[in-house]
Amino acid sequence: MPWLGGSYRLRLRRVKGGPALVWQGNSESNFQANLEILKNSTGLPVVRA
């Protein structure tokens, strides 16, 4: 999730531990596109932190 002055990041939560960074960038459009790809391919709900 983007934060003021920073980049956009997508992370997946591991079964046995913390998050795994799967994408990082500075573009809102790329963030949304990659988020949709992850949602469609995994079928998992999005949890924003």
Image (cartoon, rainbow, N blue to C red):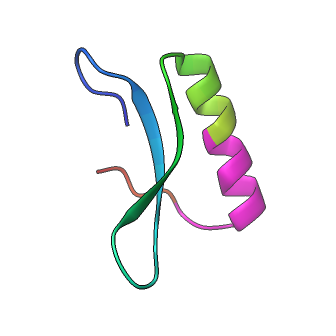
Q: Quadrant of residue 6 in the image?
A: top left
Please give the name of the residue rendered at 77% of the width and 59% of the height, measured from the top-left corner.
41
- Picture layout, residue 40 above or below residue 34: below
Q: Does the magenta stretch include residue 2?
A: no
- Picture layout, residue 46 above or below residue 24: below
Decide if residue 35 is on the left or right side of residue 25. Answer: right
How many numbered discs sit on the rendered protein? Answer: 0
Q: Quadrant of residue 13 in the image?
A: bottom left
Q: Furthest residue to the right?
A: 41
Please give the name of the residue rendered at 66% of the width and 38% of the height, measured from the top-left corner.
34
Residue 36 is situated, as x and y percent measured from the top left of the image, at: 68, 43
Residue 4 is situated, as x and y percent measured from the top left of the image, at: 22, 18
Please give the name of the residue rendered at 67% of the width and 52% of the height, measured from the top-left corner.
38
Residue 8 is situated, as x and y percent measured from the top left of the image, at: 43, 29
Decide if residue 10 is on the left or right side of residue 44. Answer: left
The range drawn in magenta is 35-45
Q: Which of the image's four quarters has the N terminus?
A: top left
- Picture layout, residue 14 above or below residue 38: below
User: 39 or 19, which is in the foreground?
Assistant: 19
User: 15 or 49, which is in the foreground?
Assistant: 15
Q: Does the magenta stretch include residue 37?
A: yes
The secondary structure that most of the magenta stretch takes on is: helix
Decide if residue 9 is on the left or right side of residue 29. Answer: left
User: 11 or 46, which is in the foreground?
Assistant: 11
Q: Furthest residue to the bottom?
A: 16
Please give the name of the residue rendered at 40% of the width and 85% of the height, measured from the top-left corner.
16
Residue 17 is situated, as x and y percent measured from the top left of the image, at: 35, 78
